[in-house]
Amino acid sequence: MPEYHQAVYVISVAAELAGVHPQTLRIYERKGLVEPGRTTGGSRRYSEADIALLRRIQDLTNDGLNLAGVKRVLELEAEVEALRSELEDHRAQVADRVESVHRKYRRDLVPLRQAVVPFGKPRRR
């Protein structure tokens, strides 16, 4: 099986895998929805990632979105994914910093030997 982002499928195979007509793929490319790889001769080649994207586009159009709406949804999904990734990075950084501070506190703590020391006058029994 080819790598996920390796462009190996010709347009007819990609169209069949995505369940669309090859001309539809050309339209999607013109609209900026998909950017297939190109051979040195200029032929289009699609990857597994492209096929997944084409299926997502089909799902959205089947739900009633036009291609402009599909493009906006895809942009927003990409933005959400980027923000999630950024948030995860920040969470990891914060966790590292908190752990670093905790290690410092543990290192700075000095054990306290507690002893019972009577205070004041001893009680009579």
Image (cartoon, rainbow, N blue to C red):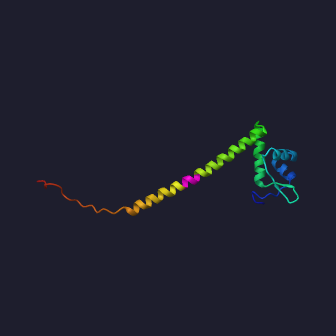
Residue at the outermost left position: 124
Left or right: 45 as drawn, with respect to 74: right
Residue 120 lies in the magenta stretch: no
| Residue range corresponding to the magenta coloring | 88-92
Which residue occupies the foreground of this view, 70 or 18? 70
Q: Residue at x 49, y 57 (%)?
A: 97
Q: Residue at x 75, y 53 (%)?
A: 49
Which residue occupies the foreground of this view, 87 or 117? 87
Magenta span dominant secondary structure = helix
Which residue occupies the foreground of this view, 82 or 51? 82
Left or right: 94 as drawn, with respect to 66: left
Q: Residue at x 42, y 61 (%)?
A: 104
Left or right: 37 as drawn, with respect to 111: right
Residue 7 appears in which quarter of the rendering?
bottom right
Residue 10 appears in which quarter of the rendering?
bottom right
Residue at the outermost top position: 64
Estimate the x, y position of residue 56 in percent, counting from the top left: 75, 45
Estimate the x, y position of residue 42 in percent, counting from the top left: 87, 56
Estimate the x, y position of residue 106 in percent, counting from the top left: 40, 61
Estimate the x, y position of residue 22 in percent, counting from the top left: 87, 47
Quick one: quadrant of the N terminus?
A: bottom right
Left or right: 34 as drawn, with respect to 107: right
